[in-house]
Each structure stands twice: as C-alpha cells, then as structure tokens.
Amino acid sequence: MAVYTRIGAEAMAALIGHFAVGTLTSAKGIAEGVSNSNWLIETGEADGATRRFILTMFEGRTEVAELPFFLGLLDHLAEAGCPVPRTIHDNSGAAFRLHEGKAVALIEFLPGVSVSQPTAGQAHAVGMALAQVHLAAATFTRTRANTMGPAAWADLLGDCGADGLAAIDAGLPALIASHLPRVTASWPADLPQGVIHADLFPDNVLMLGDEVTGMIDFYFACNDTVAYDLAVTHAAWCFDDAGTRFLPDVSAALLAGYHAVRPLGAAEQAAMPMLAQGAALRFLATRAYDWLNTPADALVTRKDPLAFARRLAFYADPANAGLFGG
C-alpha cells in the first residue's frame, strides 16, 4: 500500500458516490507498502452509522486485465470462509471502475491490526490461515501466471545495474552474482501448483490477539508452487525487520500451523530451503529496484533491500538447511 496519485476532496466524494455505501466523510492516504495507492475511506449513513472501506487505485505494476482475477479471488475466498475482504461492487455491479484512466476498487474493511513483532501464537494462526487459503483456492477457476518469478528477479536486478546495487551496499553485487544463477538454475519445477498470495508479510495480515481477522493485499496473487508461498511467508515472519536475527520459535509455530491444515509432501519439504532462498531473492530484487526508482515525492516508505540480502545468506547457509524439517 502507498499513495502515488492524489485525488481531491470533490473528486473523491464523486467517486465514492458510485458505490451504495453512504456519503464520504473522510479519506486518508495509507503510506505503507510500495505497489498501489490506497486510502482509508469512512462514509456516513442517513441513520448516523459510520462505515469503513479501503479504496485502492492500481498503479503501474497491476494490469487492468488482471483485476477480475484479483478481485474475483477475494470474493471466492471470502465465500469459502477465509478471513479475506470482499470487493464492494459499484452501482452497476462492476468490481472496479476507472478514475482518470486508472482502475480503482473499493474493498471491505476488516477489523484488526498488523503486528510488528509476531509471537509464536500469531505465527501459528497465520500458518493455518495460509493453508486454508491454499485449500479454498483450489476451486478458483481463474488463473494468472506469476510475473514476479525467477526471470523477473534477474531482470529487476539487471535494471538496477552493478553500480546501483553497489550504491545500496558495496557487497550486494557479489552476493547476487553468487546466489542468483545457482537458485534460478536449481528452481523446483515439479511441485504441487495452485493459487498463492505471494506477499503475505505481517503488514498484509490483520490480527486480534492470536486470531487472524484479515488477509489483505492479494495483488501479487498468482498460480505457482504452493510451497513457495509458505517460503515467502516464512521469510516475511521469521526474522526481525532488519533480517539480522532469526526467530526459531516463530518459525516452528508458523510451520506447525501450516502443517496442521495442509501437510507438505515429501518433495515439497525437501525443496523448502531452495524455495526460501528464492523468496529472499524475490524481495531483495524488488526492494533494490524500488530503492533506486521510487519518486522522491511519493508518499511511500521504501523498504531496505539488505534485510533480504541477510535472509538470503541465512537460507543459503548449509547449517540452516534443517530448519524446515524433513
């Protein structure tokens, strides 16, 4: 989430007027994240009731043609009982509409807060919720290729250039040269496939205590290796923000929660160390690119690429290969 595009008060009120959600009373930009522009919307009903929604404007990384997949997936998972927000369709029944050439969607607001220092109990609940999504998504009929797979990592890092990477950290070009060719050449191709979230960081999960109340921001969701989604989530949850400290209790709880709902097969289990290295490379690549290319005036918090360089080094260390079991 972020705000790249400004919408004036009158234009915002007119936009919200296309949905049967009451009268706009407040629209606040949300700064977290890096992909789309987002606002917290509050509306008032005639009886004085207040309602909340999330308005998303899809920026350059999201193709309008892919929105039926993303928004349909939200509705499918919500219908299946997953803690996922529904899409609010406009007065014509459309799941999204255009505003000044950009697609926008209004999404159900769910209660809860994103945790910054996950506990083992919270990680266990997230593992269970992720596995629930994987099982429920098995009956979703739309498909979307992963546009952020290994080929994209190489392209993004190549676009950064050796000089750009070195400007972030002097050791970064050598780290990438050491690991990127090896991981992409060894990338598993024969594991169970399905719809994955692909970006389940703590700020994309809402919680009340140890209960998952919302899984949000599905705009990288795609069809890919299901166990890779668990690897992404592991990399996102099982370290401190800087990637300098591994959290073994959180790791064990996350994996146990997932296995309680959808046990990994033997081949998936064996592939987890490589999948985790790929997850670290994926976010190292996008963070490095965004670090060098985010507009200076964007209301957005840039994410540190080195946090995932450290995760990559951790997962690549043979001494840590057994943390996924098997």
Image (spheres, rainbow, N blue to C red):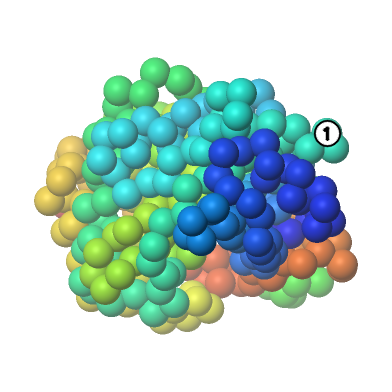
Residue 31, compared with residue 89, is above or below; it is below
What residue sits right under mark 1 in the picture? 101
Identify the residue at horizontal 79%, vertical 37% (top origin).
99
Let me know if residue 278 appears in the view: no
Q: Examine the rendered structure and indicate whether residue 117 appears above or below residue 57.
A: below
Q: Quadrant of residue 96?
A: top right
Q: How many labels sit on residues?
A: 1
Q: Give the left or right position of residue 20, taking residue 235 as reference.
A: right
Which quarter of the rendering shows the N terminus? bottom right
Name the residue at the top extreme. 141
Front-lying residue, 46 or 43: 46
Q: Is residue 257 above or below residue 22?
A: below
Q: Amino acid at mark 1?
A: Gly
The foreground one among 14 and 297 is: 14
The percent coordinates of residue 219 (x first, y second) are: 56, 42
Residue 213 lies, in percent from the top left, at: 32, 58
Horizontal and vertical percent for residue 242? 53, 78
Q: Residue at x 39, y 18 (%)?
A: 141
User: Quarter-wise, where is residue 271 in the image?
Assistant: top left
In percent of the image, x 57 and y 39: which residue is there? 20
Mark 1 surroundings within 10 Å by alpha-carbon count, few (fewer than 14), some (14 through 19), many (20 or more): few
Q: Residue at x 45, y 20 (%)?
A: 142
Q: In what element is the residue under mark 1?
A: loop
The one of 65 and 156 positioned closer to us in this rendering: 65
